[in-house]
Amino acid sequence: MARYIGATCRLCRRASGKLMLKGERCYTPKCAVERRTRNTAHGRRRRVSDRALQLLEKQKARYTYGLLERQFRGLFSRAEKQAGITGENLQVLLARRLDNVVYSGGFADSRAQARQLILHGHLTLNGKRTDIPSRLVNEGDILRWKESSTRTDYYKQLLESIRGKTVPAWLSLNQETMTARIASLPLPDETMTKFDNKAIVEYYSR
């Protein structure tokens, strides 16, 4: 599976803002974006073209969900073929990815960590083991921890830390059984995205 293996914080700097790619670290003074902002004196900035702004929004979305260009373009093509507004369809498809569900459900501090949990087979979807982070979930799907994985130190620590976490309205989390259920498909305004979907549509329309 192809993936980005460069410096994670560099992606945030390219996107000109925090993308929360390192989980809890992004909230601390150790965040590289925070340090760079404090220590850098900005001079005059040149005007940015509309095309560059559209590219920036597309890259923000890609970096946030950890997708390569070919993967992102394929998901956009799928959104185009669906009924409705393409940009909103894209938001929903991104939110329905299994790695995003694991992250949104509080089982991981970042989407990268969520992908690792899935690839290592720690979770089951509807009672079956799955190791495909890009898989799209459906309404009614149930995400559980594999029995053997409940004996790991990570799971034991998660039992304590997850009690203070909140999940999106379209997810139902049982903190006692550590089970997440897709209560409904997410609406565009429930995806908590930080990019302009209209700009992405305009970028691919040229």
Image: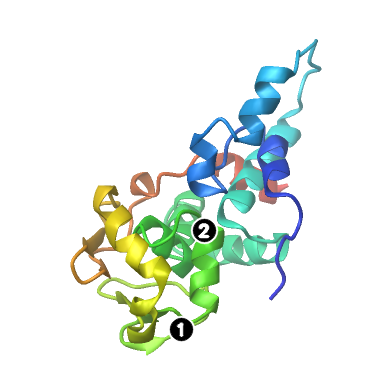
Disc 2 marks a residue whose amino acid type is Arg
Q: Residue at x 71, y 59 (%)?
A: 69
Q: In the image, what residue type sits under mark 1? A: Thr
Question: In the drawing, does residue 121 fall left or right of residue 175?
Answer: right
Q: Residue at x 46, y 44 (%)?
A: 193
Name the residue at the bottom extreme: 128
Instruction: Give me the residue at 35% from left, 57% from top.
Output: 106
* Relative height, residue 28 to residue 5 (above, below): above
Q: Quadrant of the N terminus?
A: bottom right
Mark earlier in primary sequence (1, 2) = 2
| Residue 149 screen position, x and y as percent | 39, 79
- Total tally of numbered discs in the picture: 2
Q: Position of residue 102 (x, y in %)?
A: 41, 64
Residue situated furthest front in the rendering: 153
The answer to which image quadrant residue 19 occupies is: top right
Residue drawn at (41%, 69%), measured in percent from left and top? Answer: 153
SS under mark 2? helix
The answer, for residue 153, to whether it is visible in the render is yes
Instruction: Please provide percent x and percent y for residue 114.
Output: 49, 64
Q: Which residue lies under the disc numbered 1?
A: 130
Foreground of the two, 46 or 31: 31
**Which percent across, then down, holds residue 147?**
32, 85
| Other-residue count near label 2 (Cα within 10 Å), few / some / many at <14 / 14–19 / ≥20 | many
**Which of the colour schemes (rainbow, by chain, secondary structure, one colour) is used?**
rainbow
Q: Which residue is mark 2?
A: 111
